[in-house]
Amino acid sequence: MAYKDPERQRAYKREWARGQRAGESGTPGGTPIPIPFRLKTAADVPAG
């Protein structure tokens, strides 16, 4: 992602790297999915 402000870009990269080291996926500022709602198999999807 391109930023006009280099400081904002550094902050984003710093947060992204921190998340990667912590084992998180996705982008900083993304909405995390609560653990109880995470699907592991297709059978976890409710029929409806």
Image (spheres, helix red, strand yellow):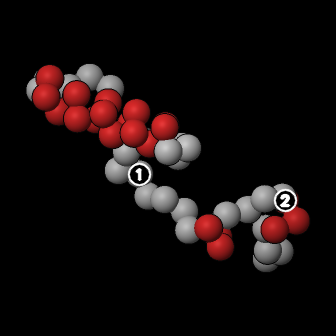
Secondary-structure class at tag 2: helix
Q: Is residue 47 visible?
A: yes
Disc assigned to residue 30: 1
Q: Residue at x 50, y 45 (%)?
A: 22
Q: Nearer the viewer, residue 3 or 25?
A: 25
Per the image, the residue denoted by label 2 is 42
Q: Residue at x 32, y 30 (%)?
A: 13
Q: Is residue 45 left or right of residue 37?
A: right
Q: Nearer the viewer, residue 47 or 19?
A: 19
Q: Nearer the viewer, residue 25 or 1?
A: 25
Residue 14 higher or lower than 46, as above or below:
above
User: Of all residues shown, which one is farthest toward the front?
Assistant: 21
Residue 21 higher or lower than 9, as above or below:
below
Residue 6, horizontal then vertical, whole percent: 14, 23
- Distance CA(mark 2)–CA(mark 1): 24 Å
Q: Is residue 2 left or right of residue 32?
A: left
Q: Residue at x 81, y 68 (%)?
A: 44
Quadrant location of residue 33?
Answer: bottom right
Classify 10 Å Cα crowding around label 2: few (below 14), some (14-19), many (20 and above): few
Residue 40 higher or lower than 15, as above or below:
below
Q: Earlier in the sequence, mark 2 or mark 1?
A: 1
Q: Amino acid at mark 2?
A: Ala
Disc assigned to residue 14: none
Q: Are marks 2 and 1 in contact (CB under 8 Å)?
A: no
Quadrant where the C terminus lies? bottom right
Q: Amino acid at mark 1?
A: Gly
Q: How many marks are shown on the rendered structure?
A: 2
Quadrant where the N terminus lies? top left
